[in-house]
Image (tube, rainbow, N blue to C red):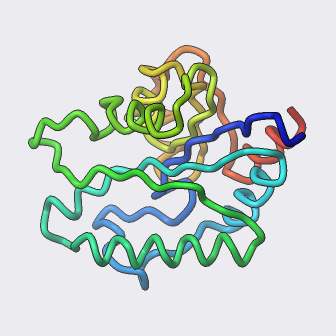
Amino acid sequence: MSAGTPHRLIILDRDGVINEDSDVYVKSAAEWRPLPGSAAAIATLNHAGYRVVVATNQSGIGRGLFDTATLNLMHTKMHRVVAQAGGRIDAVFFCPHKNDDHCKCRKPKPGMYQEIARRFARDLAGVPAVGDSLRDLVAAAAVGCQPILVRTGKGMKTLAEGNLPPGTQVFDDLAAVAAHFRRH
């Protein structure tokens, strides 16, 4: 990218896209394990001119399963693993609320994406947003992002259930997403 060209942006869900998901929540840095190829995929996206932002529901905080300090340790590990692969995550946005808190930031509501748009001072129309669950895709589509489903995490179940937002693209994993956007 030339010095005057703005960076492109891509938004990633965390659990099931970057790291292994768990039905009982990822509750510690020890439980946070990257999916094969995900850190290298983020590096590939960076080298193709993308700023990588993570948007993740973390209701384990609201449920008392872990605290913000523990979440920060998980994210420190994630940043380190990605850096070791030659990549960088520019920002992490998270919602600590439970479903019944009725907040505006918990996906499928678009609040986290709206905050990303504010913080990066940009329209999110067409910005790729990668997730493994319908709630990720619905939140992305609500702000005009290009919804992308990966088959990792809950992705195969999400695909089988159908009802994807119109125009949703489907890839095997984050590495396939990165390979696609490296070419485009």
Q: Is residue 180 left or right of residue 28?
A: right
Q: Is residue 132 left or right of residue 40?
A: left
Residue positioned 58% across, 37% down in the render: 149
Q: Position of residue 40 (x, y in %)?
A: 75, 64
Q: Reply above or below: 2 against 147.
A: below
Report the quarter where the N terminus lies. top right
Q: Residue furthest left?
A: 100
Q: Residue furthest top?
A: 166
Residue positioned 52% across, 19% down in the render: 144
Q: Is residue 161 left or right of residue 146?
A: left
Q: Position of residue 58 (x, y in %)?
A: 30, 57
Report the quarter where the C terminus lies. top right
Quick one: 25 or 59, which is closer to the camera? 59
Residue positioned 55% across, 22% down in the render: 123
Q: Residue furthest front?
A: 4
Q: Reply above or below: 70 against 131.
A: below
Number of numbered discs on residues: 0
Q: Position of residue 92 (x, y in %)?
A: 46, 55
Quick one: 56 or 7, which is closer to the camera? 7
Residue positioned 65% across, 33% down in the render: 170
Q: Position of residue 48 (x, y in %)?
A: 83, 46
Q: Is residue 83 left or right of residue 154?
A: right
Q: Reply above or below: 161 against 50.
A: above
Quick one: 129 or 72, which is closer to the camera? 72
